[in-house]
Image (spheres, rainbow, N blue to C red):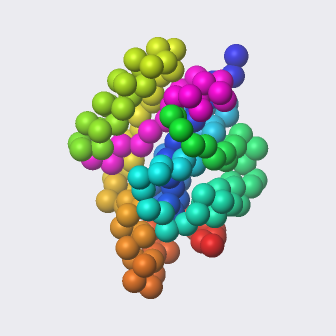
Amino acid sequence: MPKTALFPGSFDPFTLGHEDIVRRALPLFDELYIGIGENQDKRYQFTLDERVRMVEGFYADEPRIHVVSYRGLTVDFARQLGVDFLLRGIRNPSDFEFEKAIAQANRQLVPELDTVFLLTTARYAYISSSIVRDVLRHHGDASVFLPDGLQLP
């Protein structure tokens, strides 16, 4: 039976840290969905369509990766996809505490859905999408934070 995972996030934009988690997760799963979510409480630099196209283009040659968008609860979307696991990256202790609480709530809502945490490689642990957005907003060179070949809209 194939093992599938959903890596949910806003990916505004998709960074080296995200790419690190995806690359390291591929040996663990047969298929990986990158779920690009829309949160009404967040203000995005890139539209949902732009974020989807950005990540789809980057993984165009990887048949085991599927880029999808969604709205609503991540667990509902995971159930809709029929995935076995949620995949989350952890950069630091505060990420862990935040993600642990979400994972426990998700497990309460959907007991058969487990969350797998991967620690971000140390050299990428300081990178966040909010830092990258700030650099881009001020017309700085954000390429050092982004995977080679990622095309920003």
Q: In this orientation, does residue 123 appear?
A: no
**Membership of 77 in magenta stretch:** yes
Which residue is farthest front?
40
* Residue in the picture at 40% in, 17% down: 108
Residue 153 to residue 40: above or below: below
Which residue is farthest bottom?
139
* Image x and y of residue 97, in percent: 26, 36
Residue 150 to residue 37: above or below: below
Would you say 79 lies left or right of 87 here? Answer: right
**Membership of 87 in magenta stretch:** yes
* Residue in the picture at 44% in, 62% down: 43
Tell how many labels: 0
What is the quadrant of the N terminus in the image?
Answer: top right
Front residue of this view, candidates 127 and 78: 78
* Residue in the picture at 32% in, 59% down: 126
Front residue of this view, candidates 141 and 129: 129
Would you say 147 lies left or right of 100 here? Answer: right
* Image x and y of residue 3, in percent: 63, 24
What is the quadrant of the C terminus in the image?
Answer: bottom right
Q: In this orientation, does residue 78 appear?
A: yes
Residue 75 to residue 18: above or below: above
* Image x and y of residue 53, in percent: 68, 60
Front residue of this view, candidates 146 and 54: 54
* Residue in the picture at 57% in, 48% down: 36
Quarter holding residue 105: top left
* Image x and y of residue 75, in percent: 52, 28
Give the magenta-colored segment's residue range. 75-92
Would you say 115 lies left or right of 126 here? Answer: right
